[in-house]
Every structure is written in structure tokens, then in C-alpha cells.
Amino acid sequence: MITKKIKITFFIFTFVYLLGFIPQEQHLNPVVGASPSSWNAKSFWYYPWGSSGTHKGIDIFADEGTPVIASTDSFVLYSGTYGRGGQVVYALSANWHFHYYAHLQQRDVASLSFVKSGQPMGAVGTTGNAKGKPAHLHYSISTLLPRLWKYDPQLPSSWKRLFYIDPGAFITQDNK
């Protein structure tokens, strides 16, 4: 006999699996009022970057408490506290893109929930390893499927780069 918990787990897995095949995405800036001048475009895949080695996202600077919104329709896989990220939201969108919102002052979404682009996710903060630094949102996007054309043996950790998308380019819709 299939229990209710197994049925729910199967439904969530099926939903998340199918979500990865939705062809369209929004490309909103996740920090309300921010512009490309709010982050350093050269910070994506910058090396060396502290204990993580390579910076796998961008830091979008804004006043603490500035609203953070969903950059695209997505399914929130996790909303909670996680290591160096502090208060984080980790969400799956179309095309198997995983969006990581970190250093949040607060989180406004729950794990295992669906969010529409533009929906509040939280607020810019200084949690995790951003404590004592200017308030910002660390935003990164990874993908389940490697983008082999991005391999560059001259870059540090180049094989890992196959699984990351430049979030600044994504926000400005230049993520080819």
C-alpha cells in the first residue's frame, strides 16, 4: 500500500522534473532597484575568491532590507540557513537552472513552494560570511546539464564552469 507521504513525494518529484523542461524563463534582476552598476561584472568566476576559490556568482549591492524578488518562475527547493550563505533560498526554474539567493536578511518564501517571477523572496542582508561586509545579495545560477562550449582550460576550475551561468548576463538577458 502506498502511503500518503510517498504519494506526495512522487508528486513533488514529478512536478520538479517537469519544471526543468519548461522552455521560457523571465530574467528579472532579483534586487529591486538594482542595475548593472550595482555589481562588478568581472566578479563572476573571479579567482582567487576567499575559501571558495572561485566566485561562482555576483554580489548585487544594495541597502540592507532592500526587497529581493524571484528572478524567474521557479520551485523553491530550500529556504533556510546554510553555511557561508547564511539565510538562503535555493530554487529550480525552467531549463534545469538552479538559482541561489544568499546572505538574505529575511526569507519570505517557504521550502517546496512555487513562486512567480517578481514575487518577494526576502531582503538583502549580511548573513553568513557576509557579516561585517556591505549588504548584498550573492546570486548564482547553476545548471544540471553541462554547457560544454564554455570549457576554457585557461580558467581556474574550468570543468566546474560548465555548470554555472553568469547571473549578470542572465539578468540582462544575454545568457547564450
Image (cartoon, rainbow, N blue to C red):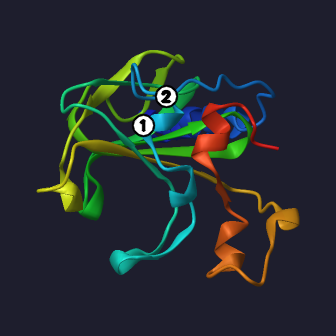
Helix, strand or loop for disc 2: loop
Q: How crowded is the residue under tag 2: few (<14 C-alpha within 10 Å), some, or many (20+)? A: some
Apparent side of residue 113 relative to residue 163 in the rendered image (left or right): left
Q: Outermost residue, front direction?
A: 37
Query: Residue 105: x, y in percent?
Result: 18, 37
| Residue at 51% over, 27% down | 29
In the image, residue 96 above or below residue 50: above
Residue 43 is situated, as x and y percent measured from the top left of the image, at 50, 59
Left or right of residue 157: residue 24: right
Q: Which residue is mark 2?
A: 35
Tell me the number on the disc at residue 150. Answer: none
Question: Which residue is located at x 81 percent, y 28 percent?
Answer: 23
Residue 51 in the image: above or below residue 31: below
Looking at the image, can residue 109 be seen? no
CA separation in Å, label 1 and label 2: 5 Å
In this image, 70 relative to 74: left or right? left
Q: Which mark is residue 38?
A: 1
Contact? badges 1 and 2 (CB < 8 Å):
yes
Name the amino acid, label 2. Ser
